[in-house]
Amino acid sequence: MIAVTKEDNKVFVRPEGDSIVAASISELRAKLREIVEAGGREVVLDLGEVEMVDSCGIGLLISAHNSLKKAGGKLAVIHASADILELFHTMRMHQHFSVSGK
Amino acid sequence: MTERTAAPAAERTGGPAAPGSQPGFEMRREIPATLEAAEELIAEFNRQCKALLDRKSCFGAELLVREALTNAVAHGSHCDAGQRVRCCLRLKRGRLLIAVEDYGCGFDWRAAWDSQAALPDCSGRGIEILRKYATSVRYNDRGNSVVIVKRLLQGVTVQGAIKEKQS
C-alpha cells in the first residue's frame, strides 16, 4: 500500500511497506509515474515506515528525480532512517535531491 | 586472482550455534531464481541477524545479501524460476560470509568493478554498494560466483582480492 496526500503544490507519497527493493518496487514505480503524468511536480517521498532501500530502490528514486526535473519539478525524501540516510549519502543521492532523516 | 566458487550445498543445513559456543549461524540454501524466493531467504537471514547483531550491522549485512542475491536472480538468471541460485550465508566470530552462485554466463566484473554510476543514471549501483559496504568481494573468473566478506565487529580495512580499500 502507498498513501498519497496533496498539500498545496506538494504530493506526499508514503510507502507503507518496510522496504523499497527489487521484489517490491513495481507498485511504487507505477504510483510515481502516475503522479508525474497527472502533473505532480513537487513530490515528497516519506520513508517513515521504510527500513531498507537497495540499489534498485535507489535507481527508482533517481529515475523519479530525472522525470520530475525534466518537467520542471523536484523530488524530496523525508523521514529516512539513520541507516538509509547514511546509504543515500554514501551513494551521493543528496547531490540529486533533498534528503532528510527522522 | 584465484578462482573461487560459492561453496554451496544442495541440501538445507545450518542454524544457530550450539549453546556455549561463539554466537553465529550458517545457512546453506539452493533456491529458485525468483525475487520471491530471495525475499524468503532474506527474511530468514534477517531473523538470525537480529538475534545477534546491532541494528546498523543488520542493515549492512542485509544490504549485501540483497545485492548479491538480486544480481544472481535478476541479472545472472533473468528471474527464470527454472534456474537455481545457490548460496551460503555464515556469521562466525564477527565475520559475515556471503557466497552466491548462479548458473548464468556471468559478467565482466573487472570492467564493472571500478565504475561509478554517473549521477543521473538509474542503474549500476549494485557493485558500488558492495564496494562500499563489504570488507572484501571476490568473483570467479566467469563472474557467476561471488564471495563477499564483511567484518562486523572490527573496522573495514581490505577490499577483497582485487585491491586495498582506502579506509
Image: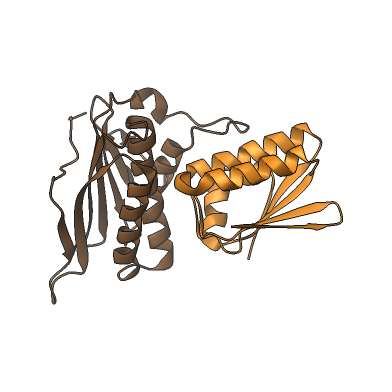
Q: Residue furthest front?
A: B82
The colour one sees for chain A in the rendered image is orange
Considering depth in this image, is B20 or A72 the residue closer to the camera? Answer: A72
Tell whether A74 sits left or right of B19: right
Q: Which chain can be seen in brown?
A: B
| Residue B31, horizontal then vertical, whole percent | 25, 45
Q: Quadrant of the C terminus of chain A?
A: bottom right
| Residue B8, horizontal then vertical, whole percent | 16, 44
| Residue B65, horizontal then vertical, whole percent | 34, 49
Q: Is residue A19 above or below residue B117?
A: below
Q: How many marks?
A: 0
Q: Residue at x 52, y 33 (%)?
A: B123
| Quadrant position of residue A58 | top right
Q: Is residue B28 above or below residue B58?
A: above
Q: Residue at x 73, y 44 (%)?
A: A35
| Residue A36, horizontal then vertical, whole percent | 74, 40
Q: Residue at x 32, y 64 (%)?
A: B49
Q: Is residue A82 visible?
A: yes
